[in-house]
Each structure stands twice: as structure tokens, then as C-alpha cells.
Image: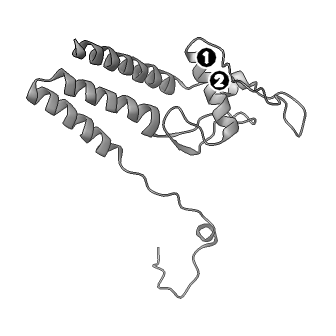
Amino acid sequence: MVPNLGRQEPPAARRGARRLPRRESALLWWALFAAFAGAAWWFQSWRIALLGLLTWCLYEFLLVPTLCRVLKRQGHPCTKRVRGRLFACAPNHQQLKNDALWRLAGLRNPFQKRDEDTDPETGVVVHSPDVRGRLTTVDRSMVVLAALGTVTTLVGMVYGFR
């Protein structure tokens, strides 16, 4: 590969490409969780351990860099980047993800607004919203673990007030 010394234009494929902003490394977050675990062990404090668990739950719900993963009408998952396992990239994808989270809790979404299930171009139902909004196994398990961690933290805080 020959370096571009400024005399030539960049290749056409690179000219219009949009570069996504860099995100912080996940290692920074895991270093913070390890610091909580080390401090809890050093001070022999279950309260610090609960604070670390609550921080991890917050990270999984709201801050983890992930993908939208809602099925598009064409059948493939959305690959746009989002923050947090509870969020999607667009309002219509967020509606599908909210419905999936309510189904994960075993309930119907009381705020559900049904959009048109048919493809606007062909008029055929490609994938129903129930299928399109299904959570992946990883997302489902991490949301359940974070919810259990949040409940554990709340129970520990109530126990600590005694």
C-alpha cells in the first residue's frame, strides 16, 4: 500500500464513509466492577458489594454498548448501535422492544400501539411484531440477571436498615 502524501484524492469508498464515534472500552467498566469487588472484600462490607451489584445492573440496563437487534421487515436484525439493553435505535423499534420486555415479564404491554403489520410496498405480512420484537437469548438472560440483581440489592438495602 502506498501512502497518500496529499497529492491524490482518497479512494471513492472512503470519501463518503461516515465514521462512528468511538466508545469507551468495556474494560473500564469491568475495572470499576473489580474495584467494587476488591473494596468489598478488603473492608469485609456486603454493603459495598451491593453497591457494586447495583452499578452492574445500571450498566446492563442503561449503559452497555450493544446493538438494536430488532428484526427489520426484511427479516434481518437491525445492526445500529445503542446504549443499554432496554433501548432501541428508533421509536418504532423501541415500541417492539418494549412489547418484548413486557412479554418477558409475562404481561401484555398496556401502552401498546399496534402499527400496520403489512409491508407498505407489497401489502404482505413479512414478520409479525411479536416475532420482530423478540429478544435474543443473550439480551433476555442479561435483563433477567440484572433484574434479579436489582431485587437482591433492594432486599439487601431493606435488610440493612434493620
Q: Which residue is mark 1?
A: 103
Does 79 appear above or below 60?
below
Q: Nearer the viewer, residue 19 or 157?
A: 157
Q: Which image quarter: residue 73?
A: top right
Q: Nearer the viewer, residue 149 or 129?
A: 149
Amino acid type of the residue tagged 2 in the rendering: Asp
Q: Mark 2: give few (<14), some (14-19) or many (20+) Cα within 10 Å.
A: many
Amino acid type of the residue tagged 1 in the rendering: Arg
Residue 69 in the image, given as x and y percentages of width and height: 59, 35
141 left or right, relative to 107: left
Q: Are dots 1 and 2 in contact, CB under 8 Å?
A: yes
Question: Which labelled disc corresponds to residue 99?
Answer: 2
The residue positioned 81% from the left and 28% from the top of the image is: 117
Q: Nearer the viewer, residue 99 or 138?
A: 99
Could you tell me if residue 64 is visible in this image?
no
112 left or right, relative to 87: right
Residue 157 in the image, given as x and y percentages of width and height: 28, 19
Question: Which labelled disc corresponds to residue 112?
Answer: none
Could you tell me if residue 147 is visible in this image?
yes
51 left or right, relative to 138: left
Task: Identify the element where label 2 is drawn.
Answer: helix
The residue positioned 49% from the left and 39% from the top of the image is: 66
Q: Nearer the viewer, residue 13 or 119?
A: 119
